[in-house]
Image (tube, rainbow, N blue to C red):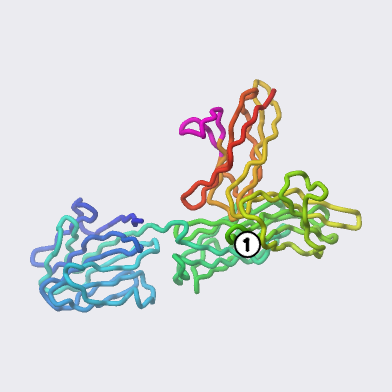
Amino acid sequence: MNYRLVFFAVLPILALALIGAVAGGPGAPRAALAAIDCDDEHRLRIDFFDDETDDLLTVAGTSVRVDPDPRDGNGTRLYVDNGSNDEEGSTTGRIHEEDACDVTDMSTPTAYTITVESLPANCDVIGDASQMTTLTQNQTVTFHVDNCLEDDDVDLDISPDRRFLDCSERTDINVRVEIEGVEAADGTDVDFSTDRGSLSPSSEETVDGEVEVEYRAPSSSGGTATIYVTVLGITETTTISIGCNVNVGPANLGFPQASCRGNSADVTFYWGPNNGGTQFLDLTLYDNNFAGGTFVNTNGLSSSTDRYTWDGLIAGIPHYLRINTLTDAGWVTSATGTFVPCGGPQIRGITYACIGGGRAAVTFHWSPSTPSGRTTWLDLSVFNNGFGGGTFANAGPMVHDWLNWTWIGVGANQTHYWRVSTLFGNNWDRSSTGSFVAFC
């Protein structure tokens, strides 16, 4: 992985390989800013060379000042960070000329300013001049470090206090952030957004690797709110179910969240309770409308229960669920939900309606993945060629917990092929291919 660097300087810049050269005035002391790039450990290399004196080289960063040790005629190794108190980020040391580079941890995307404030009287450039920038005293170079982390490098544990809300109700959302397995540094920006309701604040900085914001449900419309959490360019989501006056109707299903462990999964189910009786969570591997003898269920749950964790479910195959509530007026049954724990999406089938002109409105049904991927698309083709490039159309991106999609205007009386594709990290996980003919 490489950082993408954009450089700005206060004096004219000559176009060189990665870094321009800034010429100093006659007789001005100079330092060399050399070979700025990113290594495999997300560290930026900055070289300042003091070749002929043992005088200290003083450099100021955006919010940190470093006074490195001299290196006896072979240059000075500097560590400059963005102002954190991390001792490792501000350690000074000596290196030899053949290793002359300054390793700086700047993995957080932001702008950094390095100002050469005082220099020895004599300072010569060492190395390939085409990759050097020569600075005179009091000149400044500002550079921006973009994100070079991948999805797997950032782990976001998103935990709403409540997974179901009535309209206008509020809940806190806690997020714990780890970057490459380590608690995020204090001050790491975490951005929030949602497609339903509001969040306050919309951006927060981590303290001890955590942030907390408040979510408020909309005042007049129910449904499922998706909460988007972004850190260092990486976005993950969670959902909150919203129902208005749900106490007079069936339970309102949220989307299950799975924790994977080998060939099994521990799944937590969320819903808005009926509040009118004893609840039962029904679960099956069969898409048969819960025919007798083909499903299992929990013991009776209280009328206010809104979540349940079921351990040891089979990973990688579709499951179907519903909430059945026994009220004084009889059984009240929720809609049927479906999901694939710890596996890719799987198709269920299609329904269609003829709309005239040799066309049909086709509704595609599938079981989505949990944990959710980054994005989901529906692919459609009239060719049975494995969806070769340029031979299919697609629709998306879909919200991760959608169970179906209606495509209006599909050609009738012709075989079509379809699949659902979900992006996990940088890899696509695709369902099997289904086929159908809309007879109109």
Horizontal arrangement in the rendering, residue 417 relative to residue 297 (left or right): left
Q: Is residue 432 above or below residue 401?
A: above
Indicate the quadrant where residue 129 lies. Answer: bottom left
Q: Residue at x 68, y 22 (%)?
A: 356
Q: Nearer the viewer, residue 357 or 113?
A: 357
> For the residue marked with disc 1, what is the amino acid?
Tyr
User: In which quadrant of the rendered image does the N terminus lie?
Assistant: bottom left
Q: Is residue 65 above or below residue 274?
A: below
Binning the other alpha carbons within 10 Å of mark 1 as few (below 14), some (14 to 19) or many (20 upward) gives many
Q: Nearer the viewer, residue 413 or 86?
A: 413
What's drawn in magenta, residue-wise?
380-395
Q: Residue at x 71, y 29 (%)?
A: 353
Can residue 429 be seen? yes
The x and y percentages for residue 186 are 46, 72
Indicate the quadrant where residue 157 lies. Answer: bottom right
**What secondary structure predominates along the stretch shown in magenta?**
loop
Q: Element under label 1?
A: strand
The x and y percentages for residue 254 are 69, 55
